[in-house]
Image (cartoon, grey):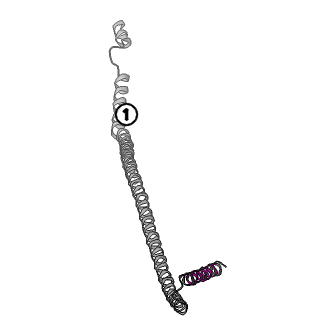
Amino acid sequence: MAQHTLADNNFLVPNATFIVEFIAFLIILAIIGKYVVPRLTKVLGERQAMIDQQVKDAQEAKHQLAQAQESYQNALTEARTEAAQIRENARAEAQRTIEELRTSAQEEAARIVARGDEQLAQQRSAVVRELRAEIGTLAVELAEKIVSQRLADDTSVSATVDAFLAGLEARDTAATTGDTA
């Protein structure tokens, strides 16, 4: 019996309790493996798929953000270029308008000067006509006075001419005084 007790107390030799516990362990392990692990695997797979999808969405969003920033920069550059072109066109248009106005003003000034020259020429020709008529009249008067006086006396002819010239000067002085008044 001593030997039998030894075998009962030896922990290396399996007894019936150990075998039942081992079989219960295997059954529980099989149940866990068949029912619990697949559900956990499914839930973990879904979470992993969700995480992968979120990572993919984040990368796509990051890519879209980069594209949007690039598009924004391109649009900004294009807008700046267009604004510069509009400013340059406005400057050119302003310069062209200034040149047109300057040319128009010069043409107007030339037309005014030409009109003034024309009026001056007309007034000059009118004055010349008046003077010719007056000189003709005066020449006739002088000739009458000279003829009416005696031609033999040089001093009397000379006095007649001097009187005529004094009359002309008096008329000229009166005409000049009348024009300025």
Q: Quadrant of the C terminus?
A: bottom right
Percent across and percent down for residue 40 are 38, 40
Q: Residues within 10 Å of mark 1 (few under 14, many from 20)?
A: few
Hey, which residue is sitting farthest right in the picture? 181
Name the residue: 35% across, 40% down.
41
Where residue 44 sits, quadrant-wise, is: top left
- Vertical position of residue 32 compared to residue 103: above or below: above
Q: Answer above or below: position of 162 versus 1.
A: below
126 in magenta: no
Is 164 colored magenta in this rendering?
yes
Callout 1, which amino acid? Ile
Tell me the SS state at disc 1.
helix
Image coordinates of residue 5 in percent, x first then y, are 37, 10
User: According to the image, label 1 marks what residue?
Assistant: 28
The answer to whether residue 131 is above or below residue 47 is: below
**Residue 166 on image: x %, y %:** 60, 80
Which residue is farthest front? 152
Percent x, y of residue 68: 39, 51
Which of the 4 quarters of the picture holds residue 110? Answer: bottom left
Residue 64 vs residue 124, the one in the foreground:
124
Which residue lies at the image location 36% right of the left edge and 22% below the top edge? 18
Query: Against 27, is 53 above or below?
Result: below
- First to last magenta residue range: 158-176
Quadrant position of residue 111: bottom left
Quarter of the image that includes the N terminus: top left
Q: Residue at x 37, y 51 (%)?
A: 74
Front in this rendered view, residue 100 or 166: 166
Outermost residue to the top: 2
Q: Nearer the viewer, residue 85 or 9?
A: 85
Please identify the dominant SS of the magenta region: helix
